[in-house]
Structures are given as C-alpha cells and as structure tokens.
Image (cartoon, rainbow, N blue to C red):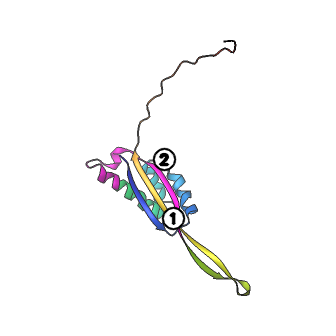
Amino acid sequence: MEAVAKLRNHPTSPRKMRLLADEIRGMQVEKALALLEHHPQHSATPLHKLLWSAVKNWEQKNEGQSAADASLIVKTVFVDGARTLKRMRPAPQGRGYRVRKRSNHVTIIVDTKVAEPAKAARPKVKHNAAN
C-alpha cells in the first residue's frame, strides 16, 4: 500500500527542485534519504524532510510494519510550479526590471518494492514470405 506526502508553496524554483527529484526517483528509501542528507544543494533539506514524512505516513497506514523491513522505494516524485511572486528591481535610466520569485509543489509517493513476475519465454516462430 502506497503513502503520499506533499510539500506546497516551497520558495525554490521548480527547475532546481526537479534536479534532485530526478536523482531519487525509483531509488530505495534508505539510499535516497542518505543521498539527500549529505547533498550540498539547498533544496535537499526540504526534500529530505518530505521523504521522511512519506515514510512515516506509510508506517501509519500499515500498522505493525516497519519501513526498514518493507524495502520501500520512491515510486513517484514530481515537482509542479506554484505561485510566482513578481517584484521590481531598479534598472538603468529610471526603468525597472521584473524579478520573478518562483515556488513549487512537490509530491512524493512511496511503496513497497513489488517483485516482477518472470516472463515466460515464447518460442520464436519464423514466418516465410512464400506462405
């Protein structure tokens, strides 16, 4: 059973947050937490806290199970743009340049790793062009 955690209106540009989100997508939760804990990028801290929250949400949904025993993976993580604050910066000759301060929404879904069923090997059939 999967669990979801959302971070709304975080004041970092979506492009910077997507760089980290792409790194942890599909990773085991323990490895992703370790990566985010020691990552030098500024947006790694809120993403680490959000992933930790998703793990705790999973533990609440699945009472009696530990996240460490379940081998959780980051099933889905996506970053959407949020509101943009528009500010003005002084520019030469009395003009003003617009500064767009972007923010984002992040959603993380964690789930247990599902073993993929082995595909049955089918015999290869050769088709003749004459038939």
* Residue that mark 2 sits on: 26
Q: Secondary structure at mark 1?
A: strand
Counting residues from the start of the chain, the first of labels 1 and 2 encountered is 2
Residue placed farthest to the front in the image?
131
Position of residue 61 relative to residue 9, above or below, is above
Quarter of the figure with residue 129: top right
Nearer to the camera, 122 or 32: 122
Residue 12 image point, x, y percent:
53, 67
The quarter in which the C terminus is drawn is: top right
Which tag is nearer the camera, tag 1 or tag 2?
Answer: 1
Q: From the viewer's perspective, tell me whether residue 17 is left or right of residue 88.
A: left
Residue 97 image point, x, y percent:
67, 79
Q: From the viewer's perspective, tell me whether residue 58 is left or right of residue 89.
A: left
Q: Secondary structure at mark 2?
A: loop
Residue 15 image point, x, y percent:
58, 61
Instruction: Give the amino acid type for the residue marked by disc 2 in the picture.
Output: Gly
* Residue that mark 1 sits on: 104
Residue placed farthest to the bottom in the image?
94
Residue 108 image point, x, y percent:
44, 55
Q: What are the residue bounds of the magenta stretch?
A: 57-83
Instruction: Give the amino acid type for the residue marked by disc 1 in the picture.
Output: Asn
Whether residue 76 is in magenta: the answer is: yes
Position of residue 105 relative to residue 125, above or below, is below
Q: CA distance from mark 1 to mark 2?
A: 21 Å
Whether residue 111 is in magenta: the answer is: no
Q: From the viewer's perspective, tell me whether residue 70 is left or right of residue 125.
A: left
Residue depicted at 41% across the width and 42% down the height: 113
Residue count near mark 2 (Cα–Cα under 10 Å), binned few <14, some 14–19, many ≥20? some
